[in-house]
Image: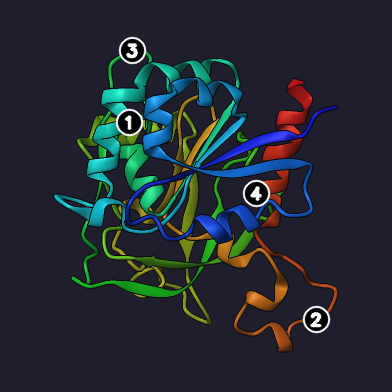
Amino acid sequence: MRKINVLVLRAPGINCDVETRRAFSDLPALTEAIHINRIIEDPGILEAADLIVVPGGFSFGDDIHAGAVLASILRTHLEIPIKKHIERGRLILGICNGFQVLVKAGLLPGLDESGVPRKVTLTSNDSGHYECRWTKLEVATRRSPFLAELPDVIEMPVAHGEGKLVPENDETLKSICVNDQIAFRYLPVGNGTSVSYPSNPSGTTMNIAGILDVSGRVLGLMPHPERFRFPFQHPTWTRREPEIEETCFPIFRGAIRYLQGLL
């Protein structure tokens, strides 16, 4: 069985590609970071990819809005190859800025039952400034290869200024809920019972931290799972029980195992 090909997208301002590649270490995967310009020159590169990851950072300096320029490039130059990638049963993961890109490219939350695009956006945090902190998350569904092996509750760090998910209207939000497309929700941190700020760092609707497309094969989330790949990356790792290794590694492992099943 061949190794799974993971394509980590690079673009000006993307700055989490190295740790994103590192997240797939110890897995049967060939991971390569490829610049968007190379892919535009040769869209066939996408045909060899089993998993496309759009990592975090500040693509194109977050000009206009976070992720907007890179999203426009994907729509203009690579819309058809990306649609074919999804139709082949392959996976896409967008982390933080990558989530913003997938939303603004129209890949998340995707089409409704009638084939009409549904719209959400990711806009400025209610706090009005950049938020960098650890958060606690509920895994809200299991209908995605990325989520199938995670524990019910997981911690991840966030680092963003525009992480508030806002649906276009109530119908869009209802559709996302009915179709079981909410991947992660923020939970109270510490001994609190409220998911208000800072537990919900952005003020996002219904405490939503990540969503899926209808197929479950496209995931976008604001927290950074690649920054909790190893137990020692947690701020309290020296005080945790040695046998507890509830890292975010299952997100990456679950994706690779699913793709192995397609080969």
Identify which amino acid the numbered label 3 is placed on. Gly
Residue found 44% across the figure and 22% down from its top: 43
Position of residue 195 in the picture relative to residue 34 (left or right): left
Identify which amino acid the numbered label 2 is placed on. Glu
Residue found 39% across the figure and 16% down from its top: 80
Identify which amino acid the numbered label 1 is placed on. Leu
CA separation in Å, label 2 and label 3: 49 Å
The residue labelled by disc 1 is 74
User: 224 above or below 212?
Assistant: below
Q: Which of marks 2 and 3 is nearer the N terminus?
A: 3
Residue found 54% across the figure and 30% down from its top: 216
Q: Earlier in the sequence, mark 1 or mark 3?
A: 1
The residue labelled by disc 4 is 251
Q: Where is residue 14 in the image (x, y as percent from the top left)?
A: 39, 55
Q: Can residue 111 be seen in this view?
A: no
CA separation in Å, label 1 and label 3: 20 Å
The residue labelled by disc 3 is 115
Position of residue 239 in the picture relative to residue 6 (left or right): right
The residue labelled by disc 2 is 241
Please state the total of marks drawn on the protein image. Answer: 4
Circle 1 or circle 3, nearest the eye: 1
Q: Is mark 3 on a helix, strand or loop?
A: loop
Q: Can residue 31 be seen in this view?
A: yes
Q: Is mark 1 on a helix, strand or loop?
A: helix
